[in-house]
Amino acid sequence: MKIGRYAVRFPLIQGGMGVRISGGSLAGHVAKCGGVGLVAAAGIAMNSEFFDGTNYMQAEPEAIRAELKKAYQIAPDGIIGVNVMVALADFETLVRAAIDGGAKIIVCGAGLPLSLPGLTAHAPEVALVPIVSSLKAAQLIAKKWEKGYGRLPDAVVVEDPDTAGGHLGEKLEQIGTGEYDQYGTIRAIKAYFREEYGSDLPVIAAGGIWDRADLEHALAEGADGVQMASRFVPTVECDADDAFKQRYLDCCKEDIGLIMSPAGLPGRAMVGNRDDIRLYDETNATVCRMGCLKKCTYKETGERFCIVSALDRAQRGDVATGLVFCGTNAWKADRITTVQEVFDELFGAEAGVGEEAA
């Protein structure tokens, strides 16, 4: 799979998991094994040496550069990038910091990154990859980028809101109806770029990809690669606390459901403790200290809960009052493996060759 100027050994992007679930360790090891490793920019300052409790916005760019450095120490020649949510208040700052830190790919979801090419114009070698759930969104991005900046996406990720974890790009009432056709959307987007722009850019399936059978199905249905996130949580190299990983091992299908994020987006997570998440903020009189989102009902009205704090608690190991995002297949996790073992299962003997070469 080729994304912009970068030839990826295996057609796999490790999905971005915010608030330090996918930091430098996980991204570096995925890149070392021959995939695209992504550091998630959202909440990267939390639980970092740069954050003193009062300087969140100043700590964010420092933390993203540090995580990229860590990833490149693991995989000096790897294809390492950053996932930056458009909904973040410091979206522009984090994009620029990612480029400063050497990110080769910038993946953007949780909103349409209409201004992204302008922010990266000084670094044309950086590949730009939006996450969408519809042909309409892909068309809007393509038209805006081509007209305003003279460039197109280097790849497009199509996320299935019925299966993906974390924030989802669909209205709550539209999720789980059975009407969404992910692979029909993928084929339509591929046809659109081919017919409208003469471009055969890779279109990548995200959501619900867990094993080799899922990978082979995605490729057979027209995807050029897959994005996987939840599968990499129960690995030695994942940046989360062991208790967070254990939550994946302990969960069952019924534990996984939908929440409404204070960002105004639905999200998929382990929902059994949703009352305890909210109660934590009430009991501790939590106030918005970070201002991490452009729009946030908690910041504006105190509704719901402080999402970056809830995610941070979970990442540190407090899965009782913290928020654990996950995809629909997280219940399939039954042991802690290594990133290399995941690649071995997905790609066979060739994956081992890739690790030795790295």
Image (cartoon, grey):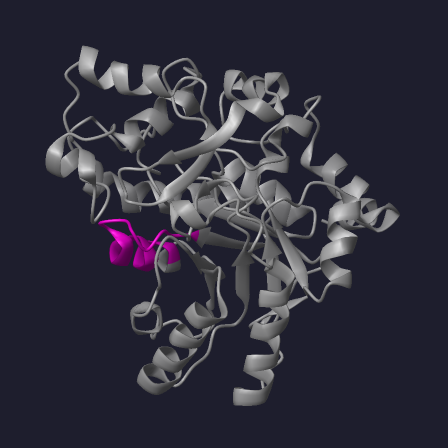
Residue 285 as seen in the image, left or right of residue 229: left
Give the farthest residue toward the top.
283
Please identify the residue farthest to the left as the structure is shown: 301
| 103 over 209 or under it: above or below | below
Q: Quadrant of residue 179?
A: bottom right
Q: Does 88 sit left or right of 178 as displayed?
A: left
Q: Give the magenta part as a residue range.
A: 83-98
Q: Residue at x 33, y 14 (%)?
A: 276
Marker count (numbered)? 0
Residue 87 percent location from the top left of the image: 29, 51
Residue nearest the viewer, comparing 17 with 32: 17
List x then y, in percent, for residue 130: 45, 63
171 vs 327, nearest the viewer: 171
Instruction: Please tell me which residue lies in front, 169 or 100.
Output: 169
Q: Quadrant of residue 253?
A: top right
Q: Position of residue 280 (x, y in %)?
A: 26, 15
Is any atom of residue 313 visible in this view? yes
**74 lies left or right of 166:** right
Up the image or down, 252 lies above or below 291; here it is above
User: Can the viewer see residue 290?
Assistant: no
What residue do we see at 17% from left, 21% from top? 286
Residue 93 part of the magenta segment: yes
**Residue shown at 56% from the left, 31% from the top:** 238
In the picture, the quarter occupied by the N terminus is bottom right
Front-most of residues 247 and 76: 247
**Residue 129 in magenta?**
no
Residue 129 % position (x, y): 48, 64
